[in-house]
């Protein structure tokens, strides 16, 4: 099904509804420009929504996302398109024609988030929001603060005639609509900002670190979901194998980063993320021992440097400078981290109850190039062509960044998009 929408080219399209996309859209809309915010997920918030806490204040995602969602809701210049994917971009600066595919949600605007459909639903799916660490109902709200505040029904529910009937019958607001189909929109915009974000590097590709082989080896983003109150363990940091609170945890830095066989670059945020996650463990288990294996500890900026120094003062946190060679089975669910201490030359075999891999940040475009004429680095980051203008990459689509720097970068890219319109 195709719907053609003719709109003035004095508008901006932002592709990606993570923190960079939200900031870009709001900065442009709040100075008077029409913005289309396109997000492939059924919700806005991106990776930040999955975190337990984020810098600089170590506050939960609600701290920053709630006000941004309210600003979007209150701004009539922003049109939010979720479950949406850009299929093609034609034209040039000031006059782009963009084809957007809208996937069915099977829940319309009548939804009040009452949850009756989830109670009636018997189909269960792996939770992508929780990196498949738990099962959720096929009819669900992505997370408590989700915007739009509307349930979504997985296609597998529709495929089960009996479950589909149960779910539809449970809704007293006539919000369940299994007749929804994929639609296509044609939008005319003057500038496009790519805020397509990042994805965690696939730790299963790092053969020597044991992810996927030993259950008590997790990634840093899995740790964030564990520590989150709305996560699979309700905020408890537990060993996946037996649900035990770990007495010892090893953090393996540069898991796939700064490695010519995987990601040759530094992912910028991994060191600070592990230091932050060390506090998660220490807060929950005051006697736990923590071992951080690193190549170089990077704390960019004075605020991060102070945080690093504070963590170093903890007598239960041990820093070992040395690249990890292997993570192997030690029995009873424990694992042994093997590394050579770069300072003493000593070979270390540290057995712990749980390992967290600081997997690197990979741009989403590394897997599949964006449907537009863009230039990329060898690693898939979009290169901005400011001379040509018209299309710009923001945040982690352009380079590895933390939340604060992403916001600053987004403000600048909003201005670049506005300048494109002003020059035409």
Image (cartoon, rainbow, N blue to C red):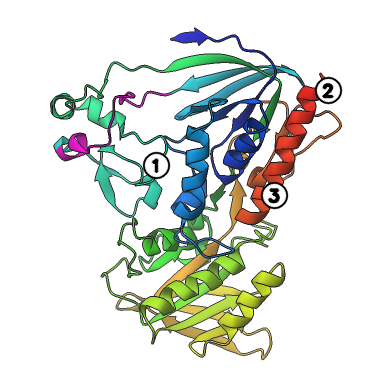
SS for callout 1 = loop
Q: Which of 12 and 135 is in front in this view?
A: 12
Q: Which of 19 and 73 is in front in this view?
A: 73
Labelled disc at residue 423: 2
Residue assigned mark 3: 408
Labelled disc at residue 39: none
- Magenta range is 103-119
Residue assigned mark 1: 146
For residue 202, above or below residue 125: below
Residue 77, image quadrant = top right
Asked whether disc 3 touches disc 1, contact meaning CB atoms under 8 Å apart, the reply is no
| CA neighbours of label 2 inside 10 A, class few (<14), some (14 to 19), many (20+) | few
Q: Is residue 309 left or right of residue 72?
A: right
SS for callout 3 = helix
- Distance from the alpha carbon under mark 2 to that under mark 3: 23 Å
All told, the count of numbered labels is: 3
Q: Is residue 216 left or right of residue 64?
A: left
> What percent of the width, then of the height, locates residue 205?
52, 55
């Amino acid at each position: 099904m195709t719907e053609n929408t003719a709109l003035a080219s004095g508008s901006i399209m932002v592709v990606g509804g993570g923190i960079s996309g939200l900031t870009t859209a709001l900065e442009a809309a709040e100075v008077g420009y029409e913005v289309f915010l396109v997000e492939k997920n059924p919700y806005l918030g991106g990776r930040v929504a999955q975190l337990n806490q984020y810098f600089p204040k170590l506050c939960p995602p609600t701290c920053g996302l709630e006000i941004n969602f309210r600003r979007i809701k209150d701004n009539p210049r922003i049109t939010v398109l979720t479950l949406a994917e850009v299929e093609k971009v034609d034209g040039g600066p000031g006059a782009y024609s963009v084809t957007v595919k809208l996937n069915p949600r099977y829940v319309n605007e009548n939804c009040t988030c009452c949850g009756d459909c989830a109670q009636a639903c018997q189909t269960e799916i792996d939770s992508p929001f929780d990196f498949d660490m738990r099962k959720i109902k096929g009819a669900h709200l992505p997370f408590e603060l989700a915007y739009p505040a509307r349930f979504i029904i997985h296609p597998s529910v529709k495929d089960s005639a009996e479950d589909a009937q149960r779910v539809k019958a449970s809704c007293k607001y006539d919000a369940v609509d299994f007749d929804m189909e994929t639609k296509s929109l044609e939008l005319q915009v003057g500038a496009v900002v790519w805020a397509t974000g990042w994805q965690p590097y696939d730790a299963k590709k790092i053969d020597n670190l044991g992810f996927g082989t030993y259950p008590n080896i997790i990634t840093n983003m899995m740790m964030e979901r564990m520590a989150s109150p709305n996560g699979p363990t309700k905020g408890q940091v537990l060993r996946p194998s037996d649900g035990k609170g770990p007495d010892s945890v090893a953090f393996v830095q540069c898991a796939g980063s700064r490695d010519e066989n995987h990601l040759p670059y530094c992912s910028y945020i991994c060191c600070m993320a592990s230091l932050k996650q060390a506090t998660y463990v220490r807060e929950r288990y005051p006697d736990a021992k923590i071992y951080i294996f690193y190549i170089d500890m990077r704390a960019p900026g004075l605020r991060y440097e102070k945080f690093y120094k504070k963590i170093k003062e903890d007598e239960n946190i041990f820093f070992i400078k040395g690249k990890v060679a292997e993570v192997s089975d030690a029995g009873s669910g424990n694992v042994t981290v093997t590394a050579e201490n770069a300072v003493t030359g000593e070979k270390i075999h540290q057995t712990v109850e749980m390992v967290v891999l600081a997997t690197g940040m990979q741009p989403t475009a590394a897997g599949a190039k964006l449907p537009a004429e863009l230039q990329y680095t060898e690693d898939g980051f979009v290169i901005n062509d400011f001379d040509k203008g018209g299309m710009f990459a923001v945040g982690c689509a352009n380079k590895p960044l933390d939340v604060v720097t992403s916001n600053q970068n987004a403000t600048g890219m909003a201005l670049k998009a506005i300048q494109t319109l002003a020059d035409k």
